[in-house]
Image (cartoon, helix red, strand yellow):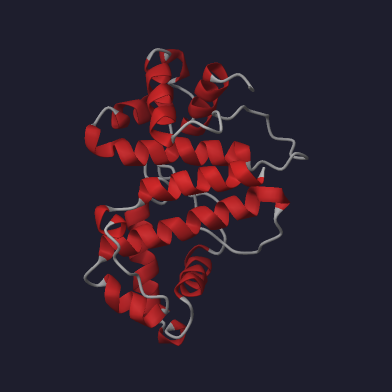
Amino acid sequence: MHLRFSGVIVACVFLVLSASAQAGVHVPGETGAFVKFCARNFKSCRDEILQEQIVIMAAKAWANSTSDKCWVPDGVDDDTAARQILGWLKQHGETATMKTEDGVETAVRAIWNCQIKIETGLTSMGVPDRTGAYMKFCGVAANYAKCANQMVADDVIIATRDPSSTAPAHCTAPKAMDSNTMAKAIYYWLYAHPETYELSTDDGVWTAIDALWPCH
């Protein structure tokens, strides 16, 4: 579980990194400096916030963690979440000396009060929440990163699932498979199976994974 958890988190974080982040842009570690930095570096800050949210979500699920940290509700896309978080932090100078990750979590808690989902027609990865609409969205090359992020995130949910959970069990992609290969395989499987298009995006992705890699 430890290796699988680490692998999928690294893969997911890698996918969300923008070109500027991959180039080594340094994001300030203190909230006040972070907010000022974000005025000119929104994409890098958005990606930093997303990375922190992914780690919190996975840590919460992994080993049935008792962490009380909140994350952005499912249904709020990355850009919208980042703008709301940065706006809140700008208005609350008392967070300026906090570590950036603590400041962001404080803002998330204050804005959404640990709400799990908001019905917007989108997942928290900013893609349509129904498989048919998701497939149309993923057919546009510019949307590839968001589509792949959704697939990796769904794989993370299953890989870090609490064994005592009563939720339906699903399979995961092979541990050694890279994220790009996994995403392409899922996309082409879904493309060939339009009967999945009425499912939620999560269920569509899980159905594809179950069919492609039957609990290897």
Q: Position of residue 50 (x, y in %)?
A: 42, 56
Q: Residue at x 54, y 17 (%)?
A: 211
Q: Position of residue 182 (x, y in %)?
A: 44, 29
Q: Nearer the viewer, residue 133 or 101?
A: 101
Q: Residue at x 56, y 33 (%)?
A: 175
Q: Can I make out residue 124 in this image?
A: no
Q: Residue at x 54, y 36 (%)?
A: 155
Q: Position of residue 64 (x, y in %)?
A: 72, 50
Q: Choose top left, top right, bottom left or bottom right for residue 191.
A: top left
Q: Quadrant of the N terminus?
A: top right
Q: Can I make out residue 151 in this image?
A: yes
Q: Position of residue 174 (x, y in %)?
A: 55, 28
Residue 33 vs residue 61: left or right? left
Q: Nearer the viewer, residue 188 or 89?
A: 188
Q: Is residue 155 above or below residue 197?
A: below
Outermost residue, right direction? Answer: 164
The total number of labels drawn is 0
Q: Residue at x 41, y 45 (%)?
A: 125
Q: Is residue 161 above or below residue 77?
A: above
Q: Quadrant of the C terminus?
A: top right
Q: Nearer the viewer, residue 181 or 132?
A: 181
